[in-house]
Image (tube, rainbow, N blue to C red):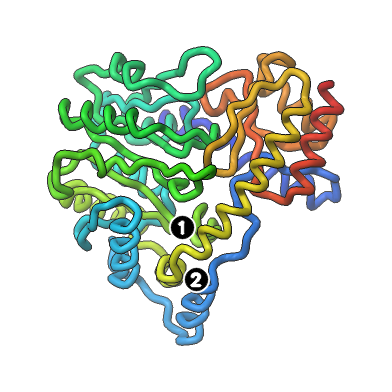
Amino acid sequence: MNLSRLALSLGQSATLKLNELANNLKAEGKPVIHLGGGEPEEKIPGGAFSESKKLLDGGFVRYTPTSGTAPLKKEIAAYTEAHYGVKPGPKNIVVASGAKQAIYNFLVSVVDPGDEVIFPAPYWVSYPEMVRLAYGTPVVVRPRPGELLCSAEDIECHLTSRTKAILLNSPNNPSGQVYPESFIREMVEICEGRNIYLLMDDIYNRLVFDGLKAPSAFTFSKKPLHDSNIVSINGVSKTFSMTGYRIGWSVANEAVTQAMVKVQAQVSSCPSALSQAAAAGALREGDAFVEGLKKSLEKKRDVMVAELAKLKKVKLHKPQGTFYSFPDFSAYDKDSTKLSNLLLDKAMVVTVPGVEFGLEGHLRLSYCGSEKDIVEGVSRIRKTLD
C-alpha cells in the first residue's frame, strides 16, 4: 500500500507517544511515574460541568455554526477584552477543536508552498510538522548557548522575502519562560513594518507565577483589529484543566478569520456542541478557578525546582509559567533521547527528550501531577544519575 510523501515525512508527536507509553505501563501494573505529561490534575470548573449536564439533560446535541456558537463567542470576546485589551467581534473569532486545530487553520489559510514560518527553540513539538502540513518551510531560531530565550535580533536576522509568519509561545512549552515586554514590542514592530503575521500561541498566558504577566501583543500594535497582523490562539485545555473537551479559538482580522472558517468547514465541520457549552460555562465562571490552579501550580513549581537543585550537574532556568521545566542534563549525557530512555528503563520515570523541542541535552519535566510524584520522580532520577 502506497502512502503520500507528506505522510511519510511527518514525525510522530513525541509527547502523545510518551503519554500512551506511560498509560500502557501503568495498565501493566508497572510503578512508572509520568513527568512528561501536559494535563493538570484538577477537576474541571463547576460552570463547565453544569453547562455540559444541562445540554445532555435536554437530549439534543447537534451541529453548531462552523465558527462556533454565539454564547461561546460572547464569552471569548469578554475574556479577550479583559486579558488582552482588545474586544473582538463575532467575525474575528473561530472556535476550533483545540488550539492545535486553530493553529493548523491559520497555517493552511496563509502559507503557500515554500513560504517560511519562523519560531524560536525550544518550541512545542508539533510546530515544525504543522508548518510542513501546510507545505511551508519551518525556520528554527536557536538561542545562544546557556539561554532559553532568543532576542529580537536573533529572529530578525532569519527573515527573508519568503517569511510569512513568526510563531511565538509565551509562556513557553517546554521551558516555562515568559518573553519580556520589550521582546514582544519589537516583534510587533517588525511584523507590522514588514507585513508579516505574528501568531501568538497564548494557551498558557494566564498560568504565570511570581506576580508576572505574559504581555499581550495587541498592547503594542498600532493597527486596529480589522487590519491587524496579529493572530492570537487560546483555549480552555490548560488554563481551565479541560484537555478532553478539545476547545480552542483564534482571534484575528476578518479576512484571515473567514479563510480559517472555510478551512475548518472542510476539515471538521464544527467543534462539539457539548464541548462549546462547557467552555462557555468555564469562561463565564470567571477568574476564581484559574487563580486556584495557578496557585497550585506555582507551589508544585517550587517543589520541582527544589528537587532538581539536589542533582549535582543539572542547570535550570526557573520556570516563570506553564507547568513545565526544561533542565539541562547535558553534563550527564548530551543525547537527550538516550538519557530519557535510560531513565525510563532504570528509574521508571517518563521524561521528554529536549531534542524533540529543538534543544539537545535538555529534558522536559512536568509538574502538573501530584507533589508526591514530583518528589519521587526526581529522587529516582537523582539516584540513577548521581
Q: Could you say which disc has been placed on residue 236 in the image?
A: 1
Q: Amino acid at mark 1?
A: Val
Viewer-proximal residue among 192 and 272: 192
Q: Which residue is mark 2?
A: 48
- Residue 116 seen by the camera: yes
Q: Could you say which disc has been placed on residue 7 in the image?
A: none
At numbered mark 2, what does the secondary structure look like: helix, strand or loop?
helix
Residue density around tag 1, few if under 14, some if 14–19, many if 20 or more, within 10 Å? many
Dividing the picture into quadrants, the one containing residue 335 is top right
Q: Earlier in the sequence, mark 2 or mark 1?
A: 2
Q: Position of residue 215 (x, y in %)?
A: 36, 41
Residue plotted at (50% across, 33% down) = 177
Viewer-proximal residue among 200 and 112: 200
Q: Amino acid at mark 2?
A: Ala
Tell whether label 1 touches label 2 (CB within 8 Å): yes
Residue plotted at (78% across, 39% down) = 377
Q: Position of residue 103 (x, y in %)?
A: 36, 44
